[in-house]
Image (tube, grey):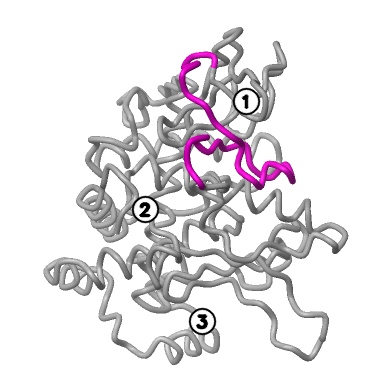
Amino acid sequence: MQLFECQNCGQTLHFENRFCGRCNHRLGYVAARQALVALRQGGELWFPIDAPHESYRFCANAEHDVCNWLVPAGGTRIFCEACSHNRTIPDLSVEGNLERWRRIEDAKHRLFYSLIQFGLPLVTRAEDPEGLVLDMIADPDDPNADKVLTGHASGLITINIAEADDAERESRRTGMGELYRTLLGHFRHEVGHYYWDRLVRDGDPAVLEQFRALFGDEREDYAEALNRHYAQGPAPDWRERCISAYASAHPWEDFAETWAHYLHIVDTLGTAGAYGLRLRPDVDQAGELATRIDFDSYRGQTIEALVDAWTPLTLAVNSLNRSMGLADLYPFVLSTPVITKLGFVHDLIASAQTTGRNG
């Protein structure tokens, strides 16, 4: 995630900022040029001070302070590039749901920042029967009714809004024996299933064969594989070939977990680069842990270059967390087979990049 600068006063800005902390200018995000801009108001419209000929309205969800993205004033759209994929939002008459929705939207907007940065195809359900659409819903009041499961099905990503409560999410993480569980991680994982459908299943047959060679045959019965995973635990050798225990359950889950971790790596490296981080521990006489993150992690790098920068960065941030008495920020190990799978995702995204919103 890049840093931004207020065009009025030069203050450093962050992606979620609504107002400049120094000059108090209203801020809005223009996805088309990936810019957080300071605004001047003229009637019902807003004008970036660095491009006063452009005019915008805020996304309709700004009314609830869950979105700071802008929509071009000349069109008919009322929702931004991220919120146009919402189908169901939480019931805001229920106490606490507005705050849950805000947390979910913060994570969702970071997801869409990455998808747009990559230039990946994005279509809504209105544009395609299997377009990307989001339901953010709560468990039913009836304790005997089925719980809402976070997951993906034919372009529909469902998020149980209970995941926005830190205590509840941590309880689920420990109950399921997971090393990591966040809202952003959920979004990145589930959208991985969506892009498997679009880029692997519906793509070049040669890509599908390459996928099967690396991840396994997805035609294995999915329900049976998950039942076996939950009944017997992960495959004994999962650490050698998968990024997580859950990834060993089925090739679809292996791909989605790998996809999510690729987005973790690229976006975190982008943030580290934005802060000008450089690593060269004094104890590392051979330079094996040295890294200088002075490249655009979203463009033009090989998977080897990304992993070479990522490995020392994770060692550093994990050490920082331990110094604060916290768990490791990135509690995973990238084995050689996992790096190869990350390379598959890297190449898949590079080959799928587009200049506009299309399928």
Please give the range of residues in magenta: 49-76
Q: Earlier in the sequence, mark 2 or mark 1?
A: 1
Answer with left or right where residue 248 lies relative to residue 41. left
| Gap in angstroms between the C-alphas marked 2 and 1 | 39 Å
Q: Which mark is residue 27?
A: 1
Q: Quadrant of residue 163?
A: bottom right
Q: Which residue is mark 2?
A: 334
Tell whether position 60 is magenta.
yes
Place of residue 128 in the rendered image (x, y in percent of width and height, measured from the top left): 37, 67
Q: Nearer the viewer, residue 64 or 156?
A: 64
Q: Are marks 2 and 3 in contact (CB under 8 Å)?
A: no
- Which SS type dominates the magenta stretch? loop
Answer with left or right where residue 271 lies relative to residue 18. left
Q: Nearer the viewer, mark 3 or mark 1?
A: 1
Q: Amino acid at mark 1?
A: Leu
**Residue at image coords 56%, 51%:** 83
Using a 10 Å C-alpha cutoff, classify the residue at mark 3 as few (fewer than 14 neighbours), some (14 to 19) or many (20 or more). some
Q: Secondary structure at mark 3?
A: loop
Q: Which mark is residue 328?
A: none
Using a 10 Å C-alpha cutoff, classify the residue at mark 2 as few (fewer than 14 neighbours), some (14 to 19) or many (20 or more). some
Q: Secondary structure at mark 1?
A: strand
Q: Secondary structure at mark 2?
A: loop
Using a 10 Å C-alpha cutoff, classify the residue at mark 1 as few (fewer than 14 neighbours), some (14 to 19) or many (20 or more). many
Q: Amino acid at mark 2?
A: Leu
Place of residue 24 in the rendered image (x, y in percent of width and height, measured from the top left): 72, 16
Q: Which residue is mark 3?
A: 233
**Which corner quadrant holds the C terminus?**
bottom left
Tell whether position 213 is magenta.
no
